[in-house]
Image (cartoon, rainbow, N blue to C red):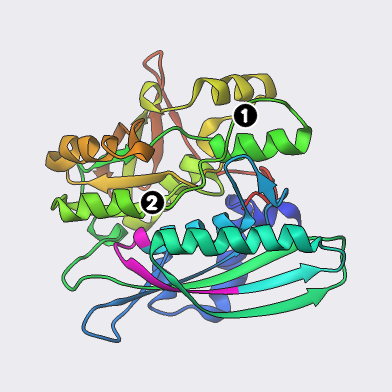
Amino acid sequence: MKIVMAHGSGGNATRELIKDLFHKYLANDYLDKMEDSAILPVSEYPLAMTTDSFVVTPLEFPGGDIGKLAVCGTVNDLWMAGAEPQYLTAGFILEEGLDLDLLDRVVASLSRTAKEAGIKIVAGDTKVVQGNGGLYINTAGLGFRKSGRHIGTDVIREGDALIVSGDLGNHHACIMSQRMEIVNSIQSDCANLGPMVEDLLQAGIEVRAMRDITRGGLGTVLNEIAEASNHAVEIEEKSIPVDPEVKSFCDILGLDPLYMANEGKFLCITAQEHAERALNILKQNPLGTKARLIGSVTETGKPLVTVKTRLGGKRVIDVLYGEGLPRIC
């Protein structure tokens, strides 16, 4: 067996690769939690640490570029653990033939996005390899989580509410449109989720867990949550927010927004009694105006994801199978 593109889809093939190979050699108490960031008790305030790599094609796209994506993707993983990002490293792998003007724009964008997020780039590396003008960025992020704040799948409870912060599928549809040279006005949702998360935490919302909805889409994220927490979750199809132009794009190409990647949306699980207030807080942010309550945690001891259809039936939502869209982030 050899590596295929499906291993990078964020779906079932990715999960099997991690479980059957990487976990076999690298398992430990921190990694086994499979959260977006590891929480390390090395100081008065717990330290959150994450790493990510970015390989998107094209390197520039409506709404962003690989530099902006690298910063937003990394800080979002820290915010999903309830940690405030502080420091970032950036390693650049440059393929021979890369245009220097393009590289200049990407690094400028990365710098600008980091400053807007209030973090410092404190270390970096550059390698040049043979290729066709490509560019890849690897990052590591560090942040601090306030003492006493516990956010993770282990505190999810039956009855908790599921909220998504906005329309699904914009980044996926944007990148696919660029590759297929389809003319439309769809832009990537690439964004720093920090302000929305900070508003929730400062308001005292009882946030159980959060996940940014990237590769594999909402369907895969929900399955990861159900498996890690050992709870069943159910969502309402009519409550899932999708931009009309993205929906039309999906209808034409036979795509399901539940499995499409995003770069500026997250799933927030809160105590049921805090759900409406959390929803109102998110909607006050320009990035969260389309936030929706989409379902709830329904049963303990049964890690299953179901959706109540518009016709009143139910169907099981599994993780993404197959390739999806490669090199999307």
Number of numbered labels in the structure image = 2
- Residue at the top extreme of this rendering: 311
What amino acid is at disc 2? Leu
- Residue 149 on the magenta segment: no
Camera-side residue of 124 and 308: 124
The residue that mark 1 highlights is 255
For the residues bearing labels 1 and 2, Cβ distance under 8 angstroms = no
Camera-side residue of 279 and 267: 279
* Rendered view: 287 above or below 3: above
Q: Secondary structure at mark 2?
A: loop
Horizontal side, residue 268 vs residue 2: left or right: left
* Rendered view: 157 above or below 97: above
In the rendered image, residue 295, in percent from the top left (x then y), is placed at 30, 33
Horizontal side, residue 101 vs residue 90: left or right: right
Horizontal side, residue 107 vs residue 3: left or right: left
> Which mark sits nearer the N-terminus, 1 or 2?
2
- Residue 83 on the magenta segment: yes
Q: Dividing the picture into quarters, in which one does residue 118 lie? A: bottom left
CA gap, disc 1 to disc 2? 25 Å
Q: Nearer the viewer, mark 1 or mark 2?
A: 2
In the rendered image, residue 249, in percent from the top left (x then y), is placed at 63, 23
Q: Secondary structure at mark 1?
A: loop
Range of residues picked out in magenta: 79-90
Camera-side residue of 270 and 196: 196
Residue 1 visible from this viewpoint = no
Residue at x 40%, y 24% (from the top left corner): 237
Q: Dividing the picture into quarters, in which one does residue 245 lie? A: top right
Q: Dividing the picture into quarters, in which one does residue 68 lie? A: bottom right
In the rendered image, residue 308, in percent from the top left (x then y), is placed at 37, 24
Q: Identify the disc placed on residue 193.
A: 2
